[in-house]
Amino acid sequence: MSDYDPKRIESKWQARWEEAGVFRVAAADPGATRFYDLEMLPYPSGRIHMGHVRNYSIGDAVARFRRMRGEQVLHVIGWDAFGLPAENAAIQNGAEPRAWTLANIEAMRGQLRRLGVGYDWSREIATCEPAYYRWNQWLFLRMLERGIAFRARRLLNWCASCGTVLANEQVVAGRCWRCDSPVTRREFEQWFLRITQYAQELLDGIDRLDGWPDRVRAMQRHWIGRSEGAKVRFAVEGADAPIEVFTTRIDTIHGATYIALALEHPAVEALVAGRPEEAAVRAFVSEQAQRSLVDRFADTADKLGVSTGRHAINPFSGERIPIWVANFVLMDVGTGAIMSVPAHDERDFAFARAYGLPVRPVVGPAGASASPDLPFTEDGVLHDSGPFAGLPSETARARMLERAVGEGFGETAVTFRIKDWGVSRQRYWGTPIPIVHCPKDGAVPVPDAELPVLLPDNAPLTGAGGSPLALVPSFVETVCPRCSGPARRETDTMDTFVDSAWYYFRYCDPENERRPFDWDKAAPWFPVDLYIGGIEHATMHLIYTRFWTKVMRDLGLVTIDEPVTSLFTQGMVIKDGAKMSKSKGNVVDPDEMIARFGADTTRLFSLFAAPPERDLEWSDAGIEGCYRFLARLWRTFDKARGSLPAAGAPKPGGAADAGALALRRKTHRTIRRITDDLGPRMHLNTPVAAIMELLNTVAPMVQGEPLENESAWAAREAFETIAKVLAPFAPHVAEELWEALGHAPFVATAPWPDVDPALLESDEALVVVQVNGKVRGKLTLPTGSTEVDVLAAARADQRIAGHIEGKTIRKTVFVPDRLLNVVAG
């Protein structure tokens, strides 16, 4: 063997794997244990980064391990190929989005192949291809038929930088999830998917996601946000229509000192029309509507408002309370109107203090003699609450609700934080929404036979806002499918999260031209056994895909409720204390690392440097250390190979020498440790350390004279084991070792090594020695030592002997291989 040459080795084995179709899966084998191993599909930006390397190395390690364990593994990849970056690149560089995207896919595909990830490339998909997005359109039309897809005019989140509407899930702390620009609210007529119809089922299903991280489940519970409470109607003086509020704390209603309305509440206009307050209210609403969500809803943002000059009547107390318009009330939360109880809500308290409004405590701690610090937001005992005074909060809520229902001014209500998913985007590079707008027939679905509605090639991309498709007459101008009259196509495209909501079903049947996929082909693989991706998708993709699966179930396309059994969220790659990014100038190029050290070293470092669920701090010394380990393994094996017995040689007879037996014990303990770590525990960093320890054990044996008999056989077993257990982590060098050991065709298809239970047993035991109940020493003795042997060893040990000498041993308690207790006096 020559010196370790990763470039030669890696290109050799990548070509052989491809030629033999090692990772290709023709169809699910009904007689096999199947395992669907999936990483979240990447956006084709043109380059993979070290975060990708880590993600895909984790998935590939698991896939290779499972395959060697005899399971049929489906491990696939595709491209989340629509989206804003391609459009921005076209604007900045004069590139055509499709050509730019396909070139990036080609580049990234090459990088992943050079990394040696074992994908079934025959199932590769790209969501920008008509063969894929045709089924986005088909599924949208099925949802339209069931009322799940609908069009409505609503206030929506607007990112001026991206020039498009955002779903609530895509607004993070008032900023755009992609570009981090402040988000404002604007009214649009848009297409929605009625995810709220599934809110309770999505919430209930979280309890059954045992294989998902607790953190992700908690984030989804919070985002779905179920609130149980009451809707209460407050009559308005001089008006026919009441104002309806939603509250979870009806027990505090006697402490309500004002009503606060959202800027967009439909009652605002009528309340101030023709009144002295009209100009001030209009000015306030206009000014606040222009502010970003960050300015309005951040924890540190000022709570601002304006009085309408009107009053509502508290239905419990009969008290007149003023009606205000406030910038901190959202129209799409609850009813867009709140009863403000400053003594028992921090936000209401701050607003009341700012505008000199009353603060009236009506709930306090049970048994307290003094009023608590305000605002008091816990349950307690009611006072100053009419007939409900003295009741605990929980009891009062039930009785107050009973009265509200009985007298017709309220009812039980459940609200959810999650809102219907707005899927319209004012961009070009996305799935066209398959709708035609007809002056006579309204919004008309495109017939299935005319799908896909194709993106035109010549849309002018300026970044000026509005949909670029609206500027393409050949796309827009069409005929109505119903009346054959002139009509216009919908010019918005779908949110790209539609593409990723169901893509892994398509992997199971990627060539199907009659339906999105054949469930008979897909069902054996579902639910996905392991899904790997970032925690940042917890309240976007991972909610959307659960919703989409339930919709497909109701459409009769699948028979499962949840798409993923086990979710693994890997940590980020950090350099210089920050997440790697171009903007921070701390990016490490995987291609450069592969060129310098090889794919195996790059993969090995990404798995060894930290537990996979934690952030990985980049270290130049760390990756160099991984390279040195592989080079040392190479040299050590090269030194030993001449004296190793041939492949398949029988184990020599006779008793094993101590060195050979110790090596065999270490080999089999290593197998057991790595097998356990690569299972559900997903401890992917510790197996690499175990392999290093095994090499440290075998290396001294091969440095001197050629090995013979038992030692040679034990060394061969150790190197064969290293080749197998290293294969999930550094597959190319593992293949080269396997071939040099005389095996064919691939270590990737070889069976995982078995453990000999007898070799897991230690030939030594640690025996605790007590004298009169106190531990006086611990002895390492041969396994199976008798009580006489242990007592003799105790008398010979200086730490213990002094506690026994000159005394009569009255009694002993002996537990073989564990304990000797001597009672002496």
Image (cartoon, rainbow, N blue to C red):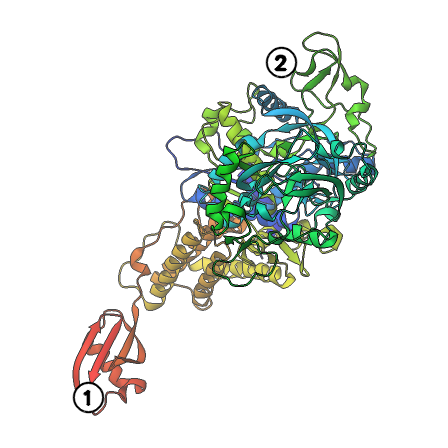
| Left or right side of 598 for 566 | left
Q: How far from the left and from the top, in percent, is residue 514?
A: 55, 18
Q: How far from the left and from the top, in percent, is residue 13?
A: 55, 44
Does residue 728 sit above or below 77 in this rendering? below
Does residue 217 sit above or below 4 in this rendering? above
Work out how far the residue at label 1 is from the one at label 2, CA to CA, in angstroms.
99 Å
Under mark 2, the amino acid is: Ala
| Residue drawn at (64%, 26%) of the image | 133
Mark 2 closeness class: few <14, some 14–19, many ≥20 residues within 10 Å: few
| Residue drawn at (57%, 32%) of the image | 195
Residue placed most toward the observer, 35 or 479: 479
- The count of marks equals 2
Q: How far from the left and from the top, in percent, is residue 21?
A: 52, 35
Mark carried by residue 618: none
Residue placed most toward the observer, 417 or 563: 417
| Left or right side of 385 for 69 | left
Dot 2 falls on a residue whose secondary structure is helix
Quarter of the image that includes the N terminus: bottom right
Q: Which residue ends up furthest to the left in the rendered image?
A: 810
First in sequence, mark 1 or 2: give its number.
2
Residue placed most toward the observer, 734 or 824: 824
Under mark 1, the amino acid is: Gly
Residue placed most toward the observer, 823 or 404: 404
Dot 1 falls on a residue whose secondary structure is loop
Mark carried by residue 825: 1
User: Residue 578 is drawn in which quadrant?
Assistant: bottom right
Does residue 111 sit above or below 452 in this rendering? below
What residue would you read off at disc 2? 449
